[in-house]
Amino acid sequence: MNHHVLIIGSIALDDIKTPWHEERGLLGGSAVYGSIAASMFAPVDIVGVVGEDFPAEHLEMLRAHGVDTSGVERRAGQTFRWGGEYRQNMNDRDTHFTELGVFAEFDPRIPEPWRDSGFVFLANIDPELQLRVLEQVRQPRLVLLDTMNLWINLKRDALIEVIKRVDAILINEDEALMLFQTHSLPEAADRLLELGVSRAIIKKGSHGAQMFSADSTFAVPALPLRKVNDPTGAGDTFAGGVIGYLAAGGTLDESSFRQAIMVGSACASFVVEDFSTRRLAALTPGQIQERCDRLHDAICCERVVMPERVPVPGKR
Amino acid sequence: MNHHVLIIGSIALDDIKTPWHEERGLLGGSAVYGSIAASMFAPVDIVGVVGEDFPAEHLEMLRAHGVDTSGVERRAGQTFRWGGEYRQNMNDRDTHFTELGVFAEFDPRIPEPWRDSGFVFLANIDPELQLRVLEQVRQPRLVLLDTMNLWINLKRDALIEVIKRVDAILINEDEALMLFQTHSLPEAADRLLELGVSRAIIKKGSHGAQMFSADSTFAVPALPLRKVNDPTGAGDTFAGGVIGYLAAGGTLDESSFRQAIMVGSACASFVVEDFSTRRLAALTPGQIQERCDRLHDAICCERVVMPERVPVPGKR
């Protein structure tokens, strides 16, 4: 059971609007995107809650990806619903509504056999719920945390508590800066490491991602995307790819994390091509490999050697 | 003469204000930063204009770096002066004043022996002046162009003409987007390549730099800087490092350009540590090598190989 990935987060129905297109009632949620991505590499167990209105076909799709959905509770009421609109630059978005529905009463219960999961992804939800998950799992090899600006504003103390108890955090650049009231990303990364995480992985949207650890940093660009149709779930997908790849490989050294970040970036580069989970659900290992190769080519460089000849002996 | 770097641009006296410090009458200008950086690698010939108020010690400093200053015209009047203030994030800045002085009448004359320079850096000045330089040089191996938002707004047609005639362009991300009225950097890069440049090198400030060519892209992060005291001249320094390194090596293939971008990034990471050219002028090859090594370590990654085992045979 130890190479299983346990994922706890939101399962949602989204209304998404972009400058070019609009769709309603789409499958969404941090745990959903994360699970599909992770399932490309390792067996996934998902914990979450849905309402009576949640289409059974979505859970069937997850199961077809090898995701164990027996931890998804179905309760009387409405599934968590979110509506948002992307601006022209497709980076900034405005939330139109958030209807918690059955999520308001969500109290995550990790099924007994899953409490020994080796890999745990705390996808973006209320940090108080994330803390309750941490109380239930036993000695996981890796706990990866994701969060968002909402929790920094509303529940900063609980969030700090969660950060102190996890191994790695994934966070958007602007949110990392907001969390520590700084303009310096290296400073924000330092503060995260001081709280106890071994790795702070900063998501930079169209600028890619950057990982900070005590003695090194690693950066990957975003693949140049000519077709961004719906950025929703890109961060969750990134995280799912990272933890799935690490669970499959089983090693947690710097090199593995770097490769995992390439994999997460590659997965995220697909999900934005279509609305909801459509592109992600149709993804093949060969397609991920191809984008990882392109990413590798985009950062590959021979070591620089200073030229021997220095033109003027003067000052240097 | 063919491995010489010819640099044409502004020579200025700057008043710089940051949230923490303020200094007046500092040595500045695109050609100055570019020349000092390039001089670390290759002999540099600088063309520009100064007024009667320009301190002789600045030209002596350039000469001590192996920069031939015989193309710097001294005219009656005041040196070009710029005053600016950086905001809290140290990325955005407001211009307080621009006094052209003797620069208003500047008509670049390239001394006859310099017209055969192998490497030409058109540092940031009026694109109409850049066109006049291009009329004077004979078959350089590489012409590198830099520009700024001012010229996109005031002289877009002339700027497009220059772009059509150069081999490579360096441009800030927001300026590239502004130039083509798009939100997509890959699209802006495509448009630059369509105009005829072989390489579009996009400067992204604290997000590093990304090079686009017809069949590949290459990205380097910015080194995590804990000490940014004055960002002025970072782009010019970057460019100087790029063209100096290319001139020293003599090869212009993809690999050389990638290494040159590492060198330019390393040089730029120093210049921001102190006001004006102070840190840059004191730089040693060993210090540049050390930061290039750190940059290399920050992008170094083994190729990802998809795990053999796919957990569920279902869809994949």
Image (cartoon, coloured by chain):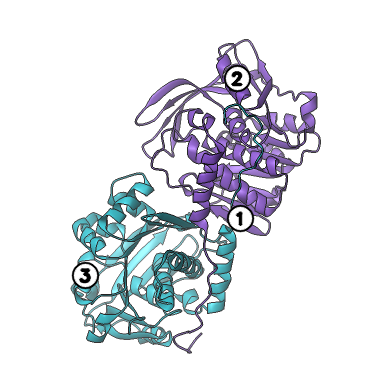
Chain colours: A cyan, B purple
Query: First in sequence: mark 3 or mark 1?
Result: 3
- Disc 1/disc 2 C-alpha distance (Å): 36 Å
User: Residue at image x 76%, y 28%?
Assistant: B114
Q: Label 3: chain?
A: A
Q: Is residue B253 visible?
A: yes
- Figure quadrant of the N terminus of chain B: top right
Q: Amino acid at mark 2?
A: Leu
- Identify the residue under disc 1: A302
Q: Amino acid at mark 1?
A: Glu
Q: Is residue B255 above or below residue B124?
A: below
- Disc 3/disc 1 C-alpha distance (Å): 46 Å
Q: Label 2: chain?
A: B
The label number, if any, that marks residue B59 in the structure image = 2
The label number, if any, that marks residue A129 in the structure image = 3
- Disc 3/disc 2 C-alpha distance (Å): 65 Å
Q: Residues within 10 Å of mark 3 (few under 14, many from 20)?
A: some
Circles 1 and 2, Cβ within 8 Å, touching? The answer is: no
Q: Residues within 10 Å of mark 2 (few under 14, many from 20)?
A: some
Tell me where residue B37 sits by quadrant.
top right
Q: Give percent across and percent down for residue B209.
A: 54, 48
